[in-house]
Image (cartoon, grey):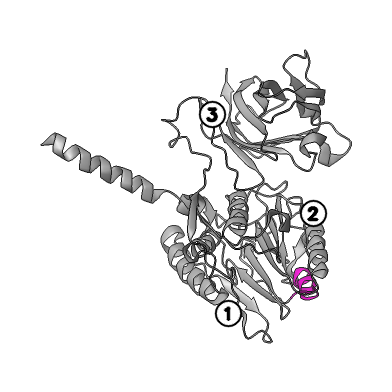
Amino acid sequence: MKRLLFFPLSLFCCVAAMLAQNTVDTKIAVNSVQDDKTFVVIISNENYKHEESVPFARNDGEVFKVYCQKTLGIPDSNIRFLSDATLNEMKFELNWLDEALKAYDGEARAIIYYSGHGMPDESSKEAYLLPVDGYSKLPSSGLSTKYLYDQLGKMHTPSIMVFLDACFSGAKRDGKMLASSRGVAIRAKEEPVGSNTIVFSAAQGDETAYPYKSQNHGMFTYYVLDKIQQSGGATTLGELSDYVTKEVRRKSVVENGKSQTPSIVFSSNNENWRSWKLASKAAKKYEDRIVAQTAQESESVPYNTAAVDQSTDAFHVQSTMSLNNVEVVTNHPDFMVKVTRCVASERSVIVDMTLTNNGSSAITDVYGFGGHRDIEYERSEAYDNEGNLYDDRHFKVKLANRKEYDFGSGTFNIPVKVPIKYSVCLEEVSPTAESISRLTLKFRCDAWGIDEHKPVMISNIPITRK
């Protein structure tokens, strides 16, 4: 009898595990129709310099980009994706969008997606999007929604769809308040938009834009993606807004015990916005997308197994061994990086890794940047799980065959399919830090088109202490 029960029980457990997975991230609808007259700007601000991080913001943006590419059929050349953007970078991408739309003489449309902190000006009640280098106590360091909507209203296009997974009450995703807040949520002013613009916001009034922790997303973003997936992209904005509003209102009470009601802002001159469609034709084909595994999911994965995601221009490598939750993102399909260990000795942490060229020819004249640079954007840097920043004189690098760590690796070559050992030394690391939450490595390689603006991003590196 025990043997008869074993198979049904095992089958039930497998089915339950499959249902628990986040299919929004892994089951992607693929459209056969290409939309080369839509331009997209995606900004995901997760790791702030002066404020607490926004959980899952980067994943929000990365997956939204995949849906734009795959489900909506938008070419990669029409999409600009920024992770952890500064104020000037945000304004630069708005200028790029304006120029792109002008070139199409009113025949193209735009999508803007933002995930990160929002904040209110306590005196004027104006709402701001907060760049990663901004201060919540200094509204002028942010991008005001008034400025944003004014710029969008002037753009030469009949249709701009804006998605904001942020709230403007002064609250963070965990419901606590930003540093600028006096502990009381603020109801920011709702700025008017032009007749060409529709704005979907994650929350209204003094509410908080909460996370959906089990799905590794902001709750608003999760249900936006869910509706796009269900419809194969061919959803109208009316259908999308009705679905997202209903599901977020219900799930937020169950998941977070608090209310969250998405809002839609549109011009009284725009009577047809509900009929606007994301994709002209529904995708009928679905494909699996491999994402980085959690430690629990990868326990049974054999050593040295790599999971490569080529659905975006970033390439993910999942380390197994004891570094189960490490995620590596590079900016070229032939450039592979694998973390092999991370060991602390007193106040220094050494992160060892291998760099591998999976292309067909050797790559020459590669240069790796350390921390101490006169130009800030050339500096590599790291954050630990306590939020401490290591750059400037606390960040050094070296190739394995060189004796000393320095602020730059010097120029080196990467032969075909021969791993090159590369090491990072972080000094004066907090003795209680348990992991390196983000390691940003800057390289310059003309052959791969990689420069200081396209860094290698490594996340969730556990520290082993001697």
Q: Amino acid at mark 2?
A: Glu
Relative to 344, say whether 225 is above or below. below
Where is residue 164? Give x, y as percent.
Answer: 64, 64
Q: Residue at x 65, y 72 (%)?
A: 199
Residue neighbourhood size for the residue with mark 1, other residues' Cα within 10 Å, grouped as few (<14), some (14–19), many (≥20): few
In the rendered structure, which disc, 2 or 1, sits on the residue that comes first in sequence?
Answer: 2
Q: In terms of secondary structure, where does tag 1 sit?
A: helix
The image quadrant of residue 150 is: bottom right
The dot on residue 89 is 2
| Residue 275 numbered mark, or none | 1
Amino acid type assigned to the residue bearing label 1 in the image: Ser
Residue type, mark 3 in image: Leu
Left or right of residue 96: residue 255? left
Q: Is residue 445 visible?
A: no
Give the Cα separation between the discs numbered 3 and 2.
33 Å
Tell me residue 62's x, y (percent): 61, 51
Q: Is 29 one of the magenta-colored residues?
A: no
Q: Which residues are magenta?
A: 146-157
